[in-house]
Image: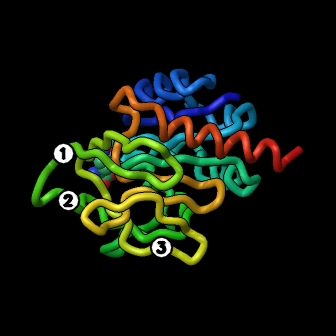
Amino acid sequence: MRVGVLALQGAVAEHIRSIENAGAEGIAVKHAEQLDELDGLIIPGGESTTIGKLIRKYDFLDAIRSFSNQGKPVFGTCAGLIVMAKEIENGEEAHLGLMDIKVSRNAFGRQRESFETDLDIRGLEEPVRAIFIRAPLITAVGNNVEVLSTYNNEIVTAREGHLLVSSFHPELTDDYSLHAYFLEMIKTNHAALK
Ligand code: GLN
């Protein structure tokens, strides 16, 4: 199984390490043509306005949309979540607009820049150590979106079919369970495509 990590900006090496520890091949993706070789794609954390600009500049906008339209799994973490959302609060233009969620950027920012906590995530046996860094929150979800975890009653992990997002950074710890969950989504997708 080959999983790409969009390597325009942000926490790329950390995601590759987590993917490999979870048992798949991790590939840094710098050109849209590379998507053809992948079974799944991760959009990492970083700064969503910058990642959004680079996605447009390097012709990833239509390429990632078509990757997702083929039912291939996409996982966005933190800024990656923002880039995948159909709607961003405060009138900011959406980027890929893949997932039926509305997000608020830097939603914890004013109180706390960053923090860690243990989160129960639906579908995972053990709580996950979650690191939040100037994290976004999901403020509304469409009918087909499944909420996988909340923190203080706010949505921080969600799934819509082949799309997965987390507000926090699962790649910054030695806990690979959310990456393993994403690999399971890819396996299920493979089975469906056969
Ligand atoms: N605050 C960043 C943004 O709005 C996201 C932060 C992160 O990815 N850690 O893009």
Identify which amino acid the numbered label 3 is placed on.
Val
Q: CA distance from mark 3 to mark 2?
A: 19 Å
Residue reaching furthest right? 194
In this picture, residue 155 sits left or right of residue 147? left
Q: CA distance from mark 1 to mark 3?
A: 24 Å
Q: Check disc 2 and report the residue beneath it.
A: 108
Q: In this rendering, is residue 180 above or below 75?
A: above
What residue is rendered at 82% in x and 44% in y? Answer: 191
Lower sequence index among marks 3 and 2 = 2
Quadrant location of the C terminus in the rendered image: top right
Identify which amino acid the numbered label 1 is placed on.
Phe
Identify which amino acid the numbered label 2 is placed on.
Phe
Which quadrant of the figure has residue 31?
top right
Residue reaching furthest front? 125
Q: Secondary structure at mark 1?
A: strand
Q: Check disc 1 and report the residue beneath it.
A: 115
Residue sitting nearer the eye, 69 or 24: 24
In this picture, residue 168 sits left or right of residue 62? left
Residue 52 pos. (x, y %): 44, 51
- Render colour scheme: rainbow
Residue reaching furthest left? 111
Lower sequence index among marks 1 and 2 = 2
Residue sitting nearer the eye, 132 or 124: 124
Q: Secondary structure at mark 2?
A: loop
Residue 91 pos. (x, y %): 35, 75
Q: Check disc 3 and report the residue beneath it.
A: 141
Residues at circles 1 and 2 in contact by the CB criterion of under 8 Å: yes
Q: Nearer the viewer, mark 1 or mark 2?
A: 1
Residue sitting nearer the eye, 22 or 97: 22
Residue 20 pos. (x, y %): 55, 22
Q: Secondary structure at mark 3?
A: strand
Residue 52, visible in the rendered structure: no
